[in-house]
Image: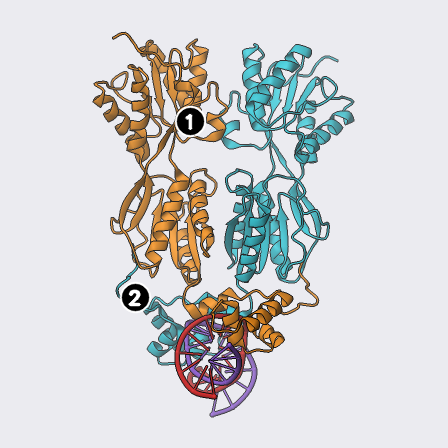
Chain colours: A orange, B cyan, C red, D purple
Amino acid sequence: MTADAELAPRRPTLADVARAAGVSVATASKALNGRRQVREETRQRVVHAAEELAFRPNVLARQLQKGRSGTIGLVTHDLEGRFSIPTLMGAEDEAGNGEVSVLLCDARGDTLRERYHVQALLGRRVDGLIIVGARPDVRPSLGRLPVPVVYAYAPSEDPDDMSQVCDSVEAGALVAEHLVARGRRRIAVVAGDESYGAARDRVEGATRALARAGLEPAGGRALFGSWDEAWGRTAVETILGLLPDVDAVICGSDQIARGALDTLREHGRRVPEDVAVTGHDNWEVIVAHSRPRLTSVDMNLEELGRRAAARLFAAIEGHPSRGIESVSPRLVARDSTRGFYTPAD
Amino acid sequence: MTADAELAPRRPTLADVARAAGVSVATASKALNGRRQVREETRQRVVHAAEELAFRPNVLARQLQKGRSGTIGLVTHDLEGRFSIPTLMGAEDEAGNGEVSVLLCDARGDTLRERYHVQALLGRRVDGLIIVGARPDVRPSLGRLPVPVVYAYAPSEDPDDMSQVCDSVEAGALVAEHLVARGRRRIAVVAGDESYGAARDRVEGATRALARAGLEPAGGRALFGSWDEAWGRTAVETILGLLPDVDAVICGSDQIARGALDTLREHGRRVPEDVAVTGHDNWEVIVAHSRPRLTSVDMNLEELGRRAAARLFAAIEGHPSRGIESVSPRLVARDSTRGFYTPAD
DNA sequence: TTGTAAGCGTTATCAG
DNA sequence: CTGATAACGCTTACAA
């Protein structure tokens, strides 16, 4: 342990610096803050003394006096999961560029814990709050709070709140258009858990995009299930039985796609020559290491986090905003949709 | 946005509460803090007034005066990666149980950024610091700081610092013993990236455990490579060529194991009947969805984070400790090592 | 039991 | 240019 428990050398204060430099605290303060109403030579002396003493201004005191804490609270519901992390990174990134620090709390999907943490953060006088949900579905509003709030990933039910979400409809459309452009025509849709709005939205986006091309999902409708590999395998078994000539499978998650790839291979279908496959989330470890490498949709969650933080800072500066804003996804094309053909029809 | 930019209703202070309750600030303070030198009826009045005004004590002020901020700094180097997250969760968990909050910074493996963040955190008067490394190898010490520091995951080079790490040697031994106990004898070891101390340590643990059983790694030595699936596939190809009768493969990561499983299946080997396979990290999404489900080692990173925080709090309370402490891993047995046999030798 | 007053470390105001 | 002095919101002797 690096601290001196014994000596307990009181951290130097501005008063110490002032004394060492032979000036008043007021002057020392000005000198250190570049207040330009101090002679250059004096400033030098103060700065030097400060360095000598390894002086670190007590931000608490400064902020007590300024009324702002220079911190924001980040309440996440899913530290464990991989969706909140990029969002959190983006926010941290945006914050780190300024002089704000981030107080992190994990509420674990528990409303009571969330309320507790929010109160604790308000007690610490955070200048604002970002609430990162665990899944992309509407959540209850925290109501009126004395500081601005931005909801990220999971939007607030109250349209007067500001929420940043990812655009699942567009995501669905993106893959469908990609496949159509590559000449695929018999496109099956293996969606995730139907209880997720995101699952339904992606299907909606895909279905509409297919309709614009005069198509519909192979088999007439999307198959909903769960988000995991096992469902990908089951679904593809079914599809191959019913529609042996399917030439593309849109999957609701990279894991589903992974299961789909395995099952297709086991049935002797070549990807992408016979069947193209797309995933969703662009989860590095899956997409980069599957065979073939998987085309996927990246929800740009880091950008989402950055925007949430930017909106929050704007609100703190007195420029609030409201409503739900969507961050556009981007398609990352890889081998699983290459080797396309143009059918003769 | 939920804040009232227009009205800007000053947050109520203790003085407001006192006024509303018709007492002095001092009395209000005592009443709210359970100082028992105040008449019950008075306390009621104060508490009521506080609720009425939705009063939240300004923790900044309280702490200015107490000299402690009630916050700890958590500097991570790998927010993106999945190893620092559980550690961070554990620390957050341990902290959340008390009344300390966590200031999170991501230094992204950059020493300069780390230094910058540490200084910023010291300025905020954190009571202590936890530095979470990106990979389990020795890292430079931050040196003497005015507050206690605990290094997590990546230990400090300075033995006078306090570091919490996972025990990779034991992890290696754990799987080897598990396989030996299940009757496996021709056990290959496919390790990760040799530049990682953890990769070498796991091999060392496994090799020693095998030696205790009178065995050595099949082929005479472990194969080092990288941490990904592709390496798992390559390595198993090699092994099957050289040692067709191999009956177990210890893999340095779950991803390697995943690649191994695929290649074994493609070569007609049944897992676990013909060949047992073990992974490392117990990465839920891999182990739970592979076929068969994968036996793996869990490094108990969350426990590591909790311990780091506990050590830090102890140090803050004046009970420092030093040296490197290891958290024991645990084996999670699944299907990939079931169906064992006892060979006739 | 309650109130008065002195800080905690800074910054801002306003005289010198 | 520099230096008293008064906040900032709260806790805590010490007095009443």
Which residue is rendered at x = 33% and y = 61% of the image? A146
Where is residue A159? Give x, y as percent.
Answer: 25, 48
Q: Answer with the quarter of the image where residue B133 lies.
A: top right
Type of amino acid under label 2: Ala
Circle 1 or circle 2, nearest the eye: 2
Where is residue A65? Give x, y as percent.
Answer: 44, 70
Residue A117, compared with residue B276, is above or below; it is below
Q: CA distance from mark 1 to mark 2?
A: 47 Å
Q: Is residue B63 visible?
A: no
Type of amino acid under label 1: Asp
Chain assignment, label 1: A
Q: Residues within 10 Å of mark 2 (few under 14, many from 20)?
A: few
Which residue is rendered at x = 38% and y = 76% of the image? B15
Residue B267, compared with residue A89, is above or below; it is above
Question: Which quadrant of the rendered structure holds the N terminus of chain A?
Answer: bottom right
Residue position marked by numbered label 1 in the rendering:
A254
Residue position marked by numbered label 2 in the rendering:
B8
**Mark 2, secondary structure of its residue:** loop
Residue A156, compared with residue A288, is above or below; it is below
Looking at the picture, tell me which residue is in the foreground, B183 or A16.
A16
Where is residue B167? Give x, y as percent.
Answer: 67, 38
Chain assignment, label 2: B
In this picture, residue B344 sits left or right of residue B7: right
Q: Answer with the quarter of the image where residue B225 lies.
A: top right
Where is residue D13? Give x, y as percent.
Answer: 56, 82
Looking at the picture, tell me which residue is in the foreground, D5 or B2.
D5
Please check whether the numbered discs 1 and 2 fall on a single chain: no
Q: Residues within 10 Å of mark 1 (few under 14, many from 20)?
A: many
In this picture, residue A344 sits left or right of residue B37: left
